[in-house]
Amino acid sequence: MLSENIKTIRKSKGLSQQELAVKLNIVRQTVSKWEQGLSVPDSDMLISLSEVLETPVSTLLGEAVIETEVDTLKAISEKLEVINLQLAQRETKRRKMIHWSLISICAIIVIVFAILLELESPYLGWNYNDPETALLGVAFHSFEWMFVRVAPIILIGAIILLKCGHKSSDC
């Protein structure tokens, strides 16, 4: 609702995202993120936004509540806190999903390597006079050849991404 209201009121005032951003001393991408619902302005910025758009904060938030200024600021802060919490939870869930996907990829690569080591390329001793056996042998050899060359790169990339996920400052 906040995102739609910001966009609608901005357009009704004849302002572009860039013009609004300049008036608020922020970058245009911030306005874009507000209007897409990817982030929300903090309480001070919300007040500045309402002043620039000449619109009450309650209208931006989609309410027609008449309260004292202290109560209004408190209500705005609480709503923004809820929205920020929801955004944080969504981001945490996404990070966990990526984290476990990378761990799964690493585990699968290690397991396949262990299986290939244990099997010791049995197709090398097969009789390739039979066309079906020859085709199967070539398929196994092609898989093993590609896996041994590509999997280490994927494994190293996944490990680096896992490390970066824990400590963003290290990347």
Image (cartoon, rainbow, N blue to C red):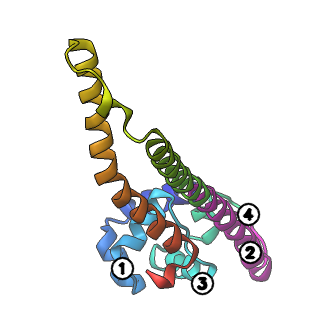
Mark earlier in primary sequence (1, 2): 1
Distance from the alpha carbon under mark 2 to that under mark 4: 8 Å
Left or right position of 6 against 47: left
Contact between labelled residues 2 and 3, with CB atoms less than 8 Å apart? no
**At 48% from the left edge and 66% from the top edge, which residue is drawn?**
159
Q: Picture quarter containing residue 25?
A: bottom left
Query: Is residue 164 placed above or below 44 in the rendered structure?
Result: above
Q: Amino acid at mark 4?
A: Val
Q: Can you identify the residue that label 3 sits on?
A: 44
Task: Say which amino acid is labelled 3.
Answer: Asp
Q: Are marks 1 and 2 in contact (CB under 8 Å)?
A: no
**Mark 1 and mark 4 in contact (Cβ < 8 Å)?**
no
Residue at left offset 42%, top offset 83%? 24
Q: Nearer the viewer, mark 4 or mark 3?
A: 3
What distance separates the C-alpha of mark 1 from that of mark 2? 27 Å
| Pointer 2 with pointer 4, Cβ within 8 A | yes
Secondary element at image label 1: loop
Q: Which mark is residue 65?
A: 4
Judging depth in this view, the residue of 53 and 124 nearest the camera is 124
Magenta residue check for 82: yes
| Magenta-span inclusion, residue 73 | yes
Q: Amino acid at mark 1?
A: Val
Residue hosting label 2: 72
Q: Main secondary structure of the magenta part?
A: helix
Q: Comparing marks 4 and 1, which lies closer to the viewer?
A: 1
**Residue pictured at 53% horizontal, 55% vertical:** 98
In whole angstroms, how far apart are the C-alphas of marks 1 and 3? 16 Å
Count residues near mark 3 (Cα–Cα under 10 Å), then give few for <14, some for 14-19, many for 20+: few
* Residues rendered magenta in the picture: 66-94
